[in-house]
Image (cartoon, rainbow, N blue to C red):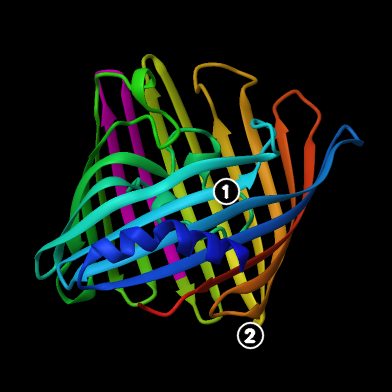
Amino acid sequence: MAWMVLFLGLLGPAHICAGAGATKLKVYTWFRYTMGTKGGDIEKSQFAVKRGYLRWEHKFSDAVRSRVTVDIFSSDEGPHGAGLKLKDAYVEFKVAPEVELKAGLQKTYFGLIYDWEYITVEKALEDKQKLVASRDYGISVGGYLPQGYGEWRLEVANGEGYNKAGKDVDESPAYLANLRVIPIPGITVGASLLKEGGDRLLVAGTGRAVLGPAEVWSEFLRSEKGDVVSLGFMLMPVFGIHPKVDIVSRCDYWDKDVDEDGDSLTRYIAGLNYYLIREPKVMVQAFWERERQEGEDPEDELSIQLRWEFASGKF
């Protein structure tokens, strides 16, 4: 609650200047214990706040709204054991009944990363393999297909992600296209493309099938950077065995260079999500992960995470 008071104090002048409209504040917190081992030896054992989102959303009118998100998290990069990241800073304009334009720091509309809700504690495959960051600076336009058959998005961005700015951003912008189609209720298929300069091309195919209490997520990735071609996939079944409990498993494969031997990795994840409250979300996640780089000892990680979120009323 102290975070909320601090955030209200910081945003007070901004709210006064906002004029007509409605403001809403949200807080998302992840408190996690992680134990990592390699070759049977413990290499990591720690508690940490892995996410501390402070989010300000303001609706100026039915056609204009904005979002700013700051992430305060445990980190050894600063002198006080905490780090700070700007994760969202955009304004959104409704330019047609089913079309919107966003400008600023926003989601990267590629593959599964833009709607990844961390059903496991692990990142989406393209994020984990450092192909695409979850946010980037740019402009996007998108909307919904007629009669609820899906959505589309076009985006131009820096291409380096939200962690890079200034001299770390090159002169070649990234161009993205994303399409999701729902041919029948419960089935979603998608395709994404990212092109940057003359030597970087990413392609993703995604799928999601909802079958009663079960759902299956899948993704195929192909990356070209210069002369290096990489390939990989993710498969993640989720089973709702109780209104409060989901069992989750996941398998990743990634070949960093298809022309080289000995550089592929496999990743297996299994665990459960226990929802104390589904909305607003209060949940416990417990997951085991094993990652094996070809030719090396496997690395195991146990993660137990408490997640909670809440929002203020509109004011």
Circle 1: is it few (<14), some (14-19), or many (20+) Cα within 10 Å?
some
User: Which residue is the site of mark 2?
Assistant: 243
Q: Quadrant of the N terminus?
A: bottom right
Q: CA distance from mark 2 to mark 1?
A: 32 Å
Q: Is residue 129 above or below residue 1?
A: above
Task: Identify the residue at the far left of this view.
Answer: 96
Position of residue 297 in the picture relative to residue 151 (left or right): right
Magenta stretch containing residue 206, yes or no? yes
Q: Magenta residues: mostly which secondary structure?
A: strand
User: Which residue is the site of mark 1?
Assistant: 72
Q: Which residues are magenta?
A: 190-209
Task: Identify the residue at the far right of this view.
Answer: 41
Amino acid type at image mark 1: Ile
Picture coordinates of residue 308, whole percent (x, y): 62, 69
Rendering quarter of residue 104: top left
Position of residue 25 in the picture relative to residue 247 (left or right): left
Q: Secondary structure at mark 1?
A: strand
Picture coordinates of residue 115, whole percent (x, y): 41, 58
- Asked if marks 2 and 1 touch (Cβ < 8 Å), the reply is no
Rendering quarter of residue 313: bottom left
Q: Quadrant of the C terminus?
A: bottom left
